[in-house]
């Protein structure tokens, strides 16, 4: 029980400083090490978060999009080297014709982004000119970037790009005839029993779903993120999961229940270097320490949303930390991984 006590102490210390709201779930091969819920899913109604609460995970669900693409490659519908112009009928007049699926999956396509996180720091500013409630489908994002110029040549560098994953979702829709959200819910969530997860509209959230909260720094009051993010998630982010469902996802992925061992290996390969210690696979971050993979992880940040989840191959642990506030999971992940 030493590790559980260590995590307890870590959480108590961090909670004193950031008033964490969310769930912490840590599992070793032999079973659950730590599982606790904190804060409110609904502050006005004093509804507590529980282990069964659904949380938005923002960009943390890019890995689902990448897996959807891997499934199409596995079936022979496309390849990772298929060019964008050959698998999507939508025209991008200013885009380089050599952009491939691989470039889009690895944030190395060079296409313009609708929200460039290296330049902009407030996601809410986007919706001053484009109301978020109009972004119900993937095609609704196209006017935000479709006719803009390339940023750099495909494959020349890593530059995190949300629009690239919007395009990947559009490819899935065109090649399958299904809406992106329907495809992922059927071919990942339902397939492996993630029965409490899905892509939900903010104006039609199911029961046991945490509202995202943003703190006004002047008044020190809380408001929801209902007008701060797109009304429905898609291929670049915005799914809702429960912590136990996310744990199911990792177990199914590493047991080759979603895609074959061959394509799981491709998904988890460090395809492009981000910095001296971090690489990127297909929809997943990969941290390297001492020339070995220390962790595979996904992350998400939106106004009122913060999420981290990681698998540590050598440590034999998996952790899931969703939050319906903008802070906490990253600090908790770093401190908790140090306890093992």
Image (spheres, rainbow, N blue to C red):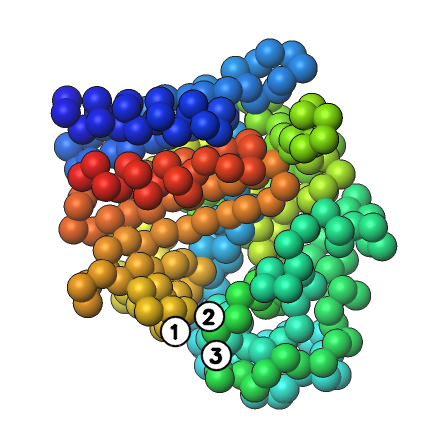
Residue 106's disc is 2
Around disc 3, counting alpha carbons within 10 Å, would you say few (fewer than 14), some (14 to 19), or many (20 or more)? some
Q: Nearer the viewer, residue 281 or 152?
A: 152
Q: Position of residue 8 (x, y in %)?
A: 28, 23
Residue marked by disc 1: 272
Q: Earlier in the sequence, mark 1 or mark 3?
A: 3
Q: Position of residue 14 (x, y in %)?
A: 39, 29
At numbered mark 2, what does the secondary structure look like: helix, strand or loop? loop
Q: Earlier in the sequence, mark 2 or mark 1?
A: 2
Whether residue 268 is visible, yes or no, is: no
Please indicate whether residue 188 sits to the left or right of residue 98 in the image.
Answer: left
Please report the residue visible at 41 percent of the width from the left and 69 percent of the height from the top.
274
Whether residue 323 is visible, yes or no, is: yes
Please report the residue visible at 54 percent of the width from the left and 83 percent of the height from the top.
154
At numbered mark 1, what does the secondary structure look like: helix, strand or loop? strand
Residue furthest toward the top?
A: 46
């Amino acid at each position: 029980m030493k590790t559980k006590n260590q995590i307890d102490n870590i959480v108590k210390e961090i909670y004193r400083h950031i008033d964490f709201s969310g769930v912490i779930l840590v599992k070793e091969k032999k079973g659950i090490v730590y599982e606790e819920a904190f804060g409110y899913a609904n502050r006005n109604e004093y509804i507590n978060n529980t282990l069964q609460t659904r949380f938005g995970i923002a960009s943390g669900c890019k890995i689902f999009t990448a897996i959807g693409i891997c499934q199409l490659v596995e079936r022979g519908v496309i390849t990772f080297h298929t060019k964008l112009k050959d698998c999507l009928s939508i025209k991008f007049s200013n885009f380089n014709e050599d952009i491939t699926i691989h470039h889009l999956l690895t944030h190395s396509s060079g296409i313009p982004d609708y929200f460039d996180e290296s330049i902009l720091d407030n996601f809410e500013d986007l919706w001053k000119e484009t109301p978020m409630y109009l972004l119900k489908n993937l095609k609704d994002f196209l006017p935000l970037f479709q006719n803009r110029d390339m940023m750099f040549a495909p494959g020349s560098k890593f530059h995190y790009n949300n629009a690239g994953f919007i395009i990947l979702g559009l490819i899935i829709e065109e090649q399958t005839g299904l809406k992106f959200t329907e495809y992922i819910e059927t071919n990942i969530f339902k397939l492996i029993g993630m029965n409490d997860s899905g892509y939900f509209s903010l104006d039609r959230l199911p029961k046991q779903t945490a509202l995202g909260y943003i703190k006004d720094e002047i008044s020190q009051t809380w408001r929801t993120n209902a007008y701060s993010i797109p009304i429905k998630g898609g291929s670049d982010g915005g799914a809702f999961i429960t912590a136990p469902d996310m744990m199911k996802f990792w177990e199914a992925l590493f047991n080759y229940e979603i895609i074959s061992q061959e394509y799981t290996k491709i998904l988890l390969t460090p395809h492009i270097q981000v910095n001296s210690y971090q690489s990127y696979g297909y929809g997943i971050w990969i941290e390297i320490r001492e020339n070995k993979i220390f962790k595979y992880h996904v992350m998400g940040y939106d106004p009122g949303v913060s999420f981290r989840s990681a698998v540590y191959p050598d440590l034999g642990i998996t952790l899931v930390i969703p939050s319906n506030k903008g802070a906490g999971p990253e600090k908790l992940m770093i401190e908790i991984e140090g306890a093992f």
